[in-house]
Each structure stands twice: as C-alpha cells, then as structure tokens.
Amino acid sequence: MKRAFGYVRVSSASQAADDRDGIPRQKETIRRWATANGVRIVEWFTDAYSGAKELEDRAQFQRMLLALHGDSVKLVVIEKLDRLARDLMLQESIVADFQRNGFELVSAMEPDLCSTDPTRVMVRQILGVFAQYERSMIVQKLRGARQRARLKNPDYREGRKPFGVRAGEPETIERIRFLRSSGMTLAAICERLAAEGYKPRADGGRWHERQIARITRTRIP
C-alpha cells in the first residue's frame, strides 16, 4: 500500500473548533480518498490560523517538507488546493516546488489538477483566482463589520478570542477530541492533559471538566 502524508490547514478559530468545517472535515475527506485509492496516511501535518503568505510561518508545512526530503514518503494529500494557499502565486509556487523535487501532490476533491498538463494548469489557476477573490471579500466584509461597530459604539472592543486561536491550542483541541472519542471521562481527560503537559489558557494552569465539555460539546448533568 502506498504511503502518504496528510496536510490540513485552517485560517480561523471557527474552522478549527467546528467539526463540520475545519480540521475534522478535511481529514475525513482525505481519508476517504486514501481508502478509495489504496493509500495509507502515515502522518498528519496541521497548520492552524495560518493566513500568512510566507511559508516560513507555517511550522507544520516546513516540518512536512523536511520529512519529504528525508523520508521514503513522497506523496502529500490535501483536501483542496486552497488549503495550500488562497494566494494564486503562492499556490502555484508550492505546486511547482513539489514537481521539481519529484514529490506527488494530490487534492482529494480535485485529483487531476496538480499535473503539468496545460489544460489542468489553466483550470487550477482559474480556481486559484476565485479562491483568492473569495478570501479578499471575506477580509473586506470582516473589516467593514468592525468599522461599523466602532462607529455605532466608540467603546467597542473585540471579544475575547476563543480557545484554539493561539499557537499550540489547535493541537490541544485535537488531542481532547481524540481522548473523548476513545471513551475517556471528562475528569480523566483533565488528568491526562495535565500529565502530558497540555496547558489551559487560564484557571491557574488547571484543566476543568467544563472546559473539556465545551470543546467536546458534552452536556454536564
């Protein structure tokens, strides 16, 4: 069975925290493609809140590149090409770099778009233009919403960022959900997180069951 790395990327807190539209969804799409094509995902690389255009700012992407150069694995599977980057020039730069180094890149939802065939390149670039435009519109709408809020209320302040925004927190969320899915109680998860060195944002460095319940959407009697 062919071995591959899975790469996922989210650029907002809601994407990382939402099972329907974020890390879990991307992984599930990649897993389905891998199963259908006789591929085994041997390692996952996840960059969260990485809207930066510089690849150097994506720690997990850089770690994956090092693994590709030093490992027998030469295939990377992503959900869609815009998970590489919404910026078209950066997206094409990554695809070209993979091709130069003999690495294989597959988009689970667009499996034929990473080739050097001129028609595929054209389609890929058109999709990249739309992804870049969509991202620009989202940024513009968010900026406009904040400006309108400030005009209505001079004392307006953005709310506290949810858990998962800061560095290391997306990995913590993923670990919590894995432990919960394996059948561990909320109290046991708190103890395990402390033993493994995972830190909450506040509460004196201690995990509490209500924190875990919020992340896993578990009702507490």
Image (cartoon, rainbow, N blue to C red):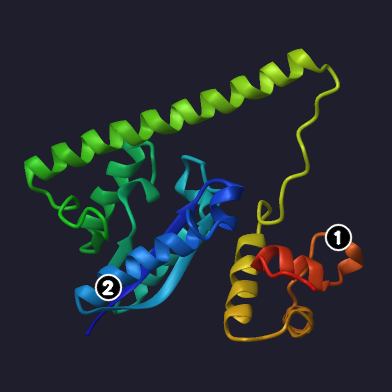
Locate residue 27 relative to residue 140 in the image: left or right: left
Q: Amino acid at mark 2?
A: Ala
Q: Which of the numbered marks, if any, corresponds to residue 34?
A: 2
**Crowd band around label 1 with a 10 angstrom C-alpha radius: few (<14), some (14–19), many (20+):** few
Image spot of residue 45 (x, y percent): 46, 66
Is residue 63 placed above or below 181 in the rendered structure? Answer: above
Q: Which of the numbered marks, if any, corresponds to residue 48?
A: none
Locate residue 103 relative to residue 145 in the image: left or right: left
Image spot of residue 64 (x, y percent): 42, 66
Q: Residue at x 67, y 61 (%)?
A: 169
**Callout 2: helix, strand or loop?**
helix
Residue 135 quadrant: top left
Residue 127 quadrant: top left
Is residue 3 placed above or below 106 in the rendered structure? Answer: below
Tag 1 residue: 202
Q: Residue at x 27, y 52 (%)?
A: 97
Residue 208 in sight: yes
Q: Quarter of the image for the N terminus: give it.
A: bottom left
**Callout 1: helix, strand or loop?**
loop
Q: Residue at x 14, y 37 (%)?
A: 122
Q: Quarter of the image for the C terminus: give it.
A: bottom right
**Which sits earlier in the primary sequence, circle 2 or circle 1?**
2
Choose between 91 and 160: the one closer to the eye. 160
Locate residue 191 relative to residue 134 in the image: left or right: right
